[in-house]
Amino acid sequence: MAVTAPSTPDTAPQIKVDDKAVTAGLGAQAYLARLEVLHDEAAETAHLSNLLSRTPMAAGAIGLAGLLTIALSLRSMPSPPLALWAAWMVIAVGITARIYGRAIASPFDRDNLKGFARDLSAILMFTGTIWGSGVTSALPPDASIAVSIFYVAGTSAAVAAALRARDVSFCFLVPAMVVGALCALIRSLDGILAADILGGGVVAAAAAVLIERYTSFGFTGRRQH
């Protein structure tokens, strides 16, 4: 059916509007919009699946760094605080393994993956807080500035390299950096050490951004710029 627009002697010639053509055009637009939504959902699912697959590497990096810290501090740190810190780290890595084991059962279920990402972000915030507290409870009292900086920034960079997702990596990095700086300030009233730890954390954050930009894809499936 065609609809004819009314005309007067002063108006342009009559224009016929084909209802079928309009309907077909709207249908094509809706189809393309739906394709774009499906594409973004598929890209997000792939991103979250990759995050799931990289989580054991991040947990392994944290666990290995914890073992190296204990080996470094075992002879010079009092046993109770070091043991308590180690116990909290074991709990954190154990919870990470638990949520990973639950999510890996449905590795392509988008809702399941989104729940996993939320849980992982929460446990990384907890882990980062415990890791930052290790500046006073795990590192030797005579640890050098370089060791303290590497303890926070090096481990954060390793987590970022494993996960390749800056938003999730920051959940570990930010509390580790802030709590580590506060602990350094409380322990020795050394503002320089605290500032150095914060500076190292900023460098690690920049590394996390670059790692994600050059090794992974965003939700739209295009390489991020």
Image: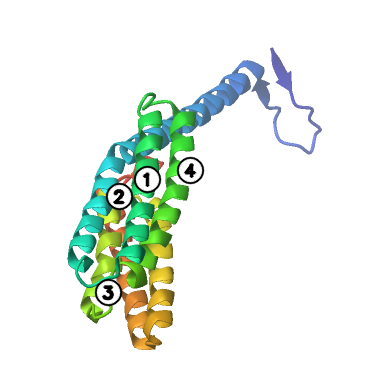
Quote the CA–CA distance across marks 4 and 2.
16 Å
Question: Disc 2 to disc 1, how far (Cα)?
Answer: 11 Å
Which is nearer the eye, 1 or 48? Answer: 48
Which residue corresponds to mark 4? 118
**Which residue type carries mark 1?**
Gly
Q: Are marks 2 and 1 in contact (CB under 8 Å)?
A: no
Q: Badge 1: how crowded within 10 Å, few (<14), some, or many (20+)?
A: some
SS of the residue under disc 1: loop
In terms of image quadrants, where is residue 220? top left
- Measuring from the top left, give residue 15's x and y in whole percent: 68, 27
Work out which residue is located at the far top of the displayed protein and give it: 1
Of the residues under marks 2 and 1, which one precedes in the sequence?
2
Question: Decide: marks 3, 2 in contact (CB < 8 A)?
Answer: no
Q: Where's residue 35, x and y in %? A: 46, 27
The residue where tag 3 is placed is 148
* Disc 2 target residue: 164
SS label for mark 3: helix
Q: Which mark is residue 218?
A: 1
Label 3 Cα crowd, 10 Å radius (few <14 / some 14-19 / many 20+)? many
